[in-house]
Image (cartoon, rainbow, N blue to C red):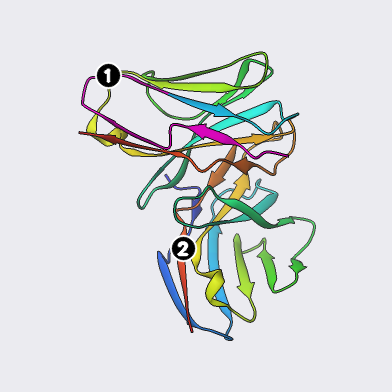
């Protein structure tokens, strides 16, 4: 069973508009969440993270929102740029020992010029 | 600082064969994790090694194994390959208890 779910396999957005990528999780014990970005033929790279003690974390054009009661997080990209076109994975830390992240299936974002 | 290096980049094998993939972590990183990426499944955790010891293991059959050497380099082995093992295998390293993983570019394995 998928503990972290990204229900939208793909998203297409116009350049300059907002991109919103969603992620749901099942276990209320999860308390740290990350977003990774992956280009073709490259490994995923860390983008932004959020701890459960916060409901929002911002880094430049990227903002992650966490709704603990709904077990939902979202990544907002404003404004979207063509270079943002990639697959975005949300992930959570499975335990405190490090190195074991549980990933969603990924959402492929396409930003059209 | 050099990133995570995985070799080979591409590999083609036939069913029943075995394969060994290699990963060199970022210098100073002692934790190495392996993930399998297949279309529609995201990244599935295989196992993690820290200081030559397997610290975590995912839900994969025993055909999937790994090890870590004293210099933190890691290898992953898959025996008796099946068609379903075709995937991108990603290695990631971290300082140890860090939740932030640094990934290599992966090894694309095709089983024919």
* Number of other residues with Cα within 10 Å of mark 2, as a class: few under 14, some 14 to 19, many 20 or more: many
Q: Residue furthest right?
A: A53
Magenta-colored stretch includes residue B10: yes
B37 or A90: nearer the viewer: B37
Q: Quadrant of residue B72?
A: top right
Q: Which residues are magenta?
A: B1-20
Residue identifier under label 1: B80
Image vertical order of residue A113 relative to residue A88, above or below: below
Q: Residue at x 51, y 21 (%)?
A: B75
State the mark number for residue A107. Answer: 2
Provide the secondary structure element on which disc 2 rests: strand
Q: Residue at x 61, y 29 (%)?
A: B32
**Residue A16 placed where, x, y %?**
59, 86
**How far, Cα to Cα, is label 1 from label 2?**
32 Å
Same-subunit check for callouts 1 and 2: no
In the rendered structure, the answer to whether residue A25 lies left or right of residue A10 reads: right
Label 1: chain letter: B
């Amino acid at each position: 069973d998928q503990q972290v779910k990204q229900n939208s396999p793909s998203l297409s957005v116009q350049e300059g508009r907002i991109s919103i990528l969603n992620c749901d999780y099942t276990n209320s014990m999860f308390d740290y969440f990350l977003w990774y970005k992956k280009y073709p033929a490259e490994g995923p790279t860390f983008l932004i993270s959020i701890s459960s003690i916060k409901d929002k974390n911002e880094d430049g054009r990227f903002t992650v929102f966490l709704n603990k009661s709904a077990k939902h997080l979202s990544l907002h990209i404003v404004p979207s740029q063509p270079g943002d076109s990639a697959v975005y994975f949300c992930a959570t830390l499975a335990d405190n020992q490090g190195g074991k992240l549980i990933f969603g299936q990924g959402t492929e974002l396409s930003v059209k010029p | 600082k050099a990133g995570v290096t995985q070799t080979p980049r591409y590999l083609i094998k036939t069913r029943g064969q075995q394969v060994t993939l290699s990963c060199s972590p970022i210098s100073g990183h002692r934790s190495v994790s392996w993930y399998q990426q297949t279309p529609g499944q995201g990244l599935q955790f295989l196992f993690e090694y820290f200081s030559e010891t397997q610290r975590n293991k995912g839900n994969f059959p025993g055909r999937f194994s790994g090890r870590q050497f004293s210099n933190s380099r890691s290898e992953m082995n898959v025996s008796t390959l099946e068609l379903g093992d075709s995937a991108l295998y990603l290695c990631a390293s971290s300082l140890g208890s860090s939740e932030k993983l640094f990934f290599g570019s992966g090894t694309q394995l095709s089983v024919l």
